Image (cartoon, grey):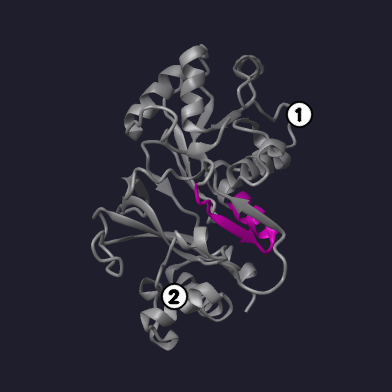
């Protein structure tokens, strides 16, 4: 079965389930870590008939094992950010074009083509952090946007302010993607009023600034940039797809991605809509690693299929981009 051709054409629950079961069986055979995990649980592949029965691999395995299908050399490796001595998640990518296709199709659902925007990144440039999936994601969007005004700014707040004012005055549609604490640092020291600007924050402040609930964070950023609402991106090193929020902290997934919620005390028990628990993610574009991941995030899924993120199981375990030096 050519999973790649089919996953981006999913049109209903039946097709999603069929592909999820197919990818589950493929990974159970070709991913040694996932195969051993299933064996230890005593699960028989033939007993799994719906995606809600598929076991989710704890995300911590990406820190301690090679979660990968096949013997061929990966085209790229993403590493989560971290401090010296910290275990970092490692996601080896067999086919980087699959990541780009998932990103661009998912982004297109929420925003349209990146060519319609000037895209600015308040984060390190790729040469400064080549192993970051977030930086790579932003760079791919910039390259497909082909606007000469696209660029990374890192700590160049003056340059970013000048760029925002310039694009505001020429009427260009602009997306600013930034680390949450970097956006706050900019807003605290620079004055910009750009009501049409699309600001996308990508995570919390653990280790950088006082932790804020999302509403407080968005309130500060809205005031700092002169915009009505703040959008968000939900992604991680271990995934090839992203969920995007149009505001209010509610994320929507593309059709090849689903979020389920598990009981905090019983990781094999899924909860119903509206209940709060641990976030499990199905990302069918993760064909050559693992598509079924139990994260350390806490959240809930709503009736319309959107989901919210309320926090983490262990606040001392700082995730990914929160530790990135911009």
Whether 98 is among the magenta residues is yes
Residue at the (69%, 56%) spot, across then down? 76
Residue, disc 2? 37
Q: Report how far apart the C-alphas of labels 2 and 1 lie in the structure.
A: 48 Å
Q: Position of residue 126 (x, y in %)?
A: 69, 39
Q: Quadrant of the N terminus?
A: bottom right
Residue 58 in sight in this render: yes
User: In the displayed structure, would residue 286 be above or below residue 296?
Assistant: below
Considering only vertical position in the picture, is 324 above or below 46? Answer: above
User: Which numbered disc, 2 or 1, marks the residue that appears first in the sequence?
Assistant: 2
Considering depth in this image, is 178 or 314 the residue closer to the camera? 314
Please give left or right for residue 268 compared with residue 25 in the image: left
| Residue at figure coordinates x 60%, y 22% from the top left | 155
SS category of the residue bearing label 1: loop
**Residue at the image position 63 percent from the left and 56 percent from the top:** 99
Locate residue 32: give its quadrant: bottom right
Mark in front: 2 vs 1:
2
Q: Quadrant of the C terminus?
A: top right
SS at mark 2 in the image? helix
Which segment is the magenta one? 86-105
Kindly identify which numbered label has been placed on residue 148: 1
User: Is 84 inside the magenta-drawn segment?
Assistant: no
Residue 280: numbered disc: none
Front residue of 69 and 162: 69
């Amino acid at each position: 079965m050519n999973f790649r051709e089919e996953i981006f054409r999913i049109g209903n629950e039946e097709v999603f389930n069929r592909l999820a079961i197919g990818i589950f069986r493929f990974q159970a055979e070709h991913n040694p870590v996932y195969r051993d995990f299933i064996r230890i649980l005593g699960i028989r592949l033939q007993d799994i008939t719906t995606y809600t029965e598929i076991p989710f691999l704890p995300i911590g395995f990406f820190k301690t094992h090679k979660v990968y299908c096949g013997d061929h050399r990966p085209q790229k490796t993403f590493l989560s950010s971290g401090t010296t001595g910290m275990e970092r998640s490692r996601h080896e990518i067999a086919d980087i074009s699959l990541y780009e296709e998932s990103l661009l199709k998912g982004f297109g659902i929420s925003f349209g083509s990146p060519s319609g925007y000037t895209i600015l990144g308040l984060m390190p440039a790729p040469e400064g952090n080549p192993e970051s999936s977030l930086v790579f994601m932003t760079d791919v969007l910039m390259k497909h946007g082909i606007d000469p005004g696209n660029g990374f700014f890192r700590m160049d707040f003056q340059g970013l302010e000048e760029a925002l004012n310039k694009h505001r005055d020429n009427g260009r549609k602009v997306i600013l993607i930034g680390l949450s604490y970097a956006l706050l640092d900019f807003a605290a020291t620079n004055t910009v009023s750009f009501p049409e600007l699309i600001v996308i924050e990508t995570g919390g402040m653990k280790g950088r600034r006082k932790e804020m609930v999302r509403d407080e964070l968005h309130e500060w950023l809205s005031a700092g940039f002169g915009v009505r609402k703040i959008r968000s991106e939900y992604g991680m090193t271990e995934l090839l797809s992203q969920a995007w929020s149009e505001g209010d902290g509610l994320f929507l997934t593309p059709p090849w991605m689903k979020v389920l919620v598990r009981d905090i005390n019983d990781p094999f028990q899924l909860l119903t809509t509206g209940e709060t628990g641990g976030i499990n993610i199905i990302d069918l574009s993760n064909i050559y690693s693992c598509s079924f991941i139990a994260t350390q995030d806490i959240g809930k899924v709503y009736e319309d299929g959107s989901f919210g993120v309320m926090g983490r199981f262990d606040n001392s375990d700082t995730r990914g981009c929160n530790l990135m030096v911009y």
